[in-house]
Amino acid sequence: MVLNRLTDSNWIFYGILALIFAGSLFFLLVPLAAVLVHGFSYIGASITSAEVRFSLLLSIRTTTEATIICMIAATASGYALKQLPPLPRKIFFSILSVPMSLPHLVSGVALLLVYGRLGIGGWLFRTTGIDFIYTKQGITLALVFVNLSYAVIMMYSAFDTNQEQMEFTARTLGCSKAGAFFNITLPVTLPSLLSTAVMTWSRALGEFGAVIMIAGSTRMKTETLPTAIYLNMATGDLDTALGISAMLILVSVLCIIILQVCIPPFRRKEAAPCSM
Amino acid sequence: MYSAVPQKGGSSMLDVEHLSVQAGSFTLSEINLQVNDGTCFILLGKSGAGKTVFLETLAGRYQVKKGKIRWNGTDITASAPEKRRIALVYQDYALFPHLTVAQNIAFPLKMAGIQKQIRRERTDGMLESFSLQNAASKYPGTLSGGERQRTALARALIMEPELLLLDEPLSALDCINKEKVQEMLQKVHASCRTTIIQVTHDFEEAQYFADTFAVMKNRTLSPVQTKDILMSMKKEDIYALLDE
């Protein structure tokens, strides 16, 4: 029987799938586990460092600011995309996907060009005093630029066609277009909105390339957690770098737990499809 | 709620003239229809004939390419859906999943800015009329098909629309719920002033409710005929008509 199973093509197929799956898991989890094992004990020491605490608070502040901006823009943009006829919608969707596939260093160069002193950044600085280069605002700008495409695509997918029928029903019941959006579409889309917000926040927290191009990584000024890892590695302080890395992994795990545990209850109220 | 005996016959309320509409890649053309005040017009047709698109066009979902829709003499062709006083109940009910049954029913009153106390009273009245008191605090995902249908009907009727559009109201129901909702609909037809356009592909349902009827096929509408003709037809005749 065992010999039969070994030669059965279905079992061979399952066996190959299992091997590739196990290999992928191993490849992904071992490095993360190594950082956690070596770095966990340095988390406490890292937190006591004024520099790391500054980086942590700066990262949380700029990441949260960027996430709020991204979610407002992405919700409106994703919804606007849904209103377009098919061809323009496809074109704009493709254009919006480009920044998502750019290397983040290239995104940083693009931001420098536009928001630096030679671009509109110079005019902004002269007229309003707002400066993006080597500043905290620059970090937020970089985080928004790098994550906005992703958030728009996620929110566009969240506004599915079922909601169009519900929205139209709301309009026949006396709702304006805006009323239908705020009273029906947004609440129904809430689980997807929360998931997108959590993922955007998680991605923004780990951003390095675009941030370092536009804001640099000046200690105690524009040093975020990812750039702190880089600086500490560059100066040979492996323990602190490992401690910060372990912290970031734990934050990512927490984000996944929130996605899997805290958000699904919001979906429970949604109607099951009426398939009678 | 159901306060007046409908005046069947009389001057036409709904006038559709040479209506052509494009909904995505789907086109309806040269639809002409008159439906009298307080009557029930049955729209028969096979799946994909364009019945739902026609109802949605009457309710204001699609831009009309050609033709006019008049309601009580007023041209409503370009009017926004919320201005038409036309309620549409979809085949799958389109209940709002984040609201309870009571909140779904009260939704039109809330949008109209009606005071909370009056909203509560009218909602309670509807819950009683449609036997939904026990389901008031439930969410749509936990309701039976019959309860969903009654909730959708109650929500559509609470603002006393002038025209009620029903898209295959009984097709998604099992036998037991079908009978209950059929009785409910009969009460609505008998006691409500509202003019009704009901879509179905079921011959017996058509005979049960129709004052007048027509067949939607090849993306256009056949001439409107009276109930007498429908009652004199056999099921096979109607299905042959749908298949022509």
Image (cartoon, rainbow, N blue to C red):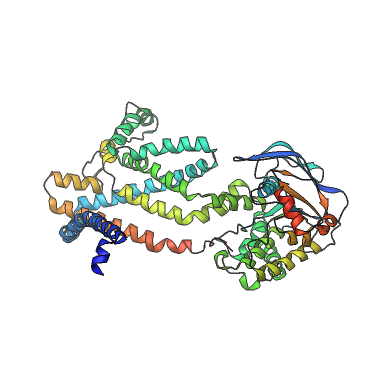
Residue B236 percent coordinates (x, y)? 74, 57
Question: Visible in this render: residue A134?
Answer: no
Q: Quadrant of residue B25?
A: top right
Q: Nearer the viewer, residue A51 or B22?
A: B22
For residue A185, side relative to residue A20 (left or right): right
Q: How many marks?
A: 0
Above or below, comparing residue A255 to residue B130 in the picture: above
Residue B68 percent coordinates (x, y)? 75, 39
In the picture as drawn, the residue positioned furthest to the top comes out as: A118
For residue A82, side relative to residue B77 (left or right): left
Residue A135 percent coordinates (x, y)? 29, 39
Q: Quadrant of the N terminus of chain A?
A: bottom left
Q: Which of B227 and B87 is in front in this view?
A: B227
In the picture as drawn, the residue positioned furthest to the left comes out as: A236
Q: In which quarter of the image is residue A119?
A: top left
Q: Which residue is drawn at 32% across and 48% down?
A: A203
Residue A20 percent coordinates (x, y)? 25, 55
In the picture as drawn, the residue positioned furthest to the bottom comes out as: B134
For residue A7, side relative to residue B4 (left or right): left
Question: Visible in this render: residue B28?
Answer: yes
For residue A103, side relative to residue B162 (left or right): left
Above or below, comparing residue B26 to residue A22 in the picture: above
Q: Residue at x 23, y 41 (%)?
A: A217
Above or below, comparing residue A20 to residue A141 in the picture: below
Q: In which quarter of the image is the C terminus of chain A?
A: bottom right
